[in-house]
Image: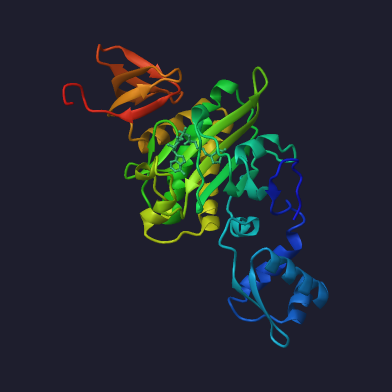
Amino acid sequence: MSSRSSRSDSRAFPPLPGREAPDRLLAQLRGGAGDFVSGSLLGERLGVSRTAIWKQVRTLQDEGYLIESHPKRGYRLRSVPSEAHPREIAVGLETRWLGHQVVVYDAVDSTNRAAMEDAALTHGAVVVARRQTEGRGRLGRKWVVPPGTLPFSLVLEPRIAPTRAPLLTLAAAVGLVDGIREGCGLDTEIKWPNDVLWRGRKVAGILTEVRSDPDQVVRAVVGIGLNVNTREEDFDPLFRDRAVSVAAAAGREVDPNGLLRHLLAALEPACDQVCGDSPEGVGRLVDQYRARCTTVGRWVNVTGVRGDVFCGYVHGIDAEGALLVRREDGATERVLAGDVSLSRPPGQD
Ligand code: BT5
């Protein structure tokens, strides 16, 4: 374990390449499909001594891998960590650039803060936490992380204008809906702008933060809080009836590492549409967002960032992801940031 932060965060695992040797051993043990593999065969295949194999086994055991050792038969893999783990995220990850650099914190204040400040991270890096103590929501709100909730942040360094950055939130929403469907077979929906809901309850929230030069984004951090195995009773009573976990929706425990792989595979093409900075890519992304967003065609109360509220009918989402809301007097408002809640059509109170 190593810690590079001056805060009280614990960095659970060093970044690659320190992890490579045990990764190769792990691949051999996985290939054993639950059977013992002898220490000498492992040493031969990996070109190292039996003592080196033993040391790597100890490293993996310390990280939470259950590896059984037998003096004559060798080693066998009994189970892998059930919490977020960089080796488990990497196994079978089918992305071109997203998630090839992964940092997993045992505990951190905010993965967004860590992802923004860590100069060693580059485009495509992912910061994950097992526990997050000061999760940020939008507009100064909090994101609460009871056990089973997975907070993670994508580090993006796209050559786009700062005004384009809100599109990354739309990309993340599209990727989350697709990744959750791929990983768990669940149909979720987007509530404009940054909520992913299952049957009206929030399963994930997104917070994009940006550091920019006057005309170009230097680093964008797309933070995602996803309720994976969170139990209903562990949610804050303040929003318990509006929150849900993927596991509760699917009716089974969910492997966070496997789900994260599906999410990254779906987030990558969605982010590509924005990072590519072409009008066609952005157009396709906004179409995908519209197809998954259930806020269109509803009556809503809109709360602007200054707290002003009005009621209207959502008749579309424009090319920049702004909500188009027709007021009762017929005028259309273009809402770029704020919150919406569903309301009844006028006269039906
Ligand atoms: C969001 O804000 O939904 C953005 C959440 C982003 C969190 C991630 S976690 C990784 C990364 N690191 C960070 O520090 N942040 C990001 P907003 O739309 O403002 O919604 C916040 C509201 O959601 C709160 O006021 C609660 O009502 C509700 N909420 C908080 N925690 C929740 C949870 N675990 N599940 C469902 N709802 C929650």
Query: Seen from this angle, which residue lies furthest front?
Result: 237
Q: Residue at x 32, y 18 (%)?
A: 310
Q: Position of residue 140 (x, y in %)?
A: 52, 28
Q: In the drawing, does residue 25 fall left or right of residue 77?
A: right
Residue 344 falls in which quadrant of the image? top left
Q: Residue at x 61, y 37 (%)?
A: 112
Query: Between 125 and 97, which is closer to the camera in this rendering?
Result: 125
Could you tell me if residue 239 is visible in this image?
Answer: yes
Q: Residue at x 18, y 26 (%)?
A: 349
Report the colour scheme: rainbow
Could you tell me if residue 97 is visible in this image?
Answer: no
Q: Position of residue 218 (x, y in %)?
A: 67, 27
Q: Position of residue 170 (x, y in %)?
A: 47, 33
Query: Seen from this angle, which residue lies furthest bottom?
Result: 72
Figure disc tally? 0
Query: Between 284 and 161, which is closer to the camera in this rendering?
Result: 161
Q: In the drawing, does residue 336 fall left or right of residue 2?
A: left
Residue 47 falls in which quadrant of the image? bottom right
Residue 240 sits above or below residue 283 on the image? below
- In the rendered image, the quadrant that contains the N terminus is bottom right
Residue 43 sits above or below residue 111 on the image? below
Q: In the drawing, does residue 327 fall left or right of residue 92?
A: left
Query: Seen from this angle, which residue lies furthest left?
Result: 347
Query: Between 244 and 97, which is closer to the camera in this rendering?
Result: 244
Q: Position of residue 254 (x, y in %)?
A: 46, 59
Q: Residue at x 44, y 51 (%)?
A: 234
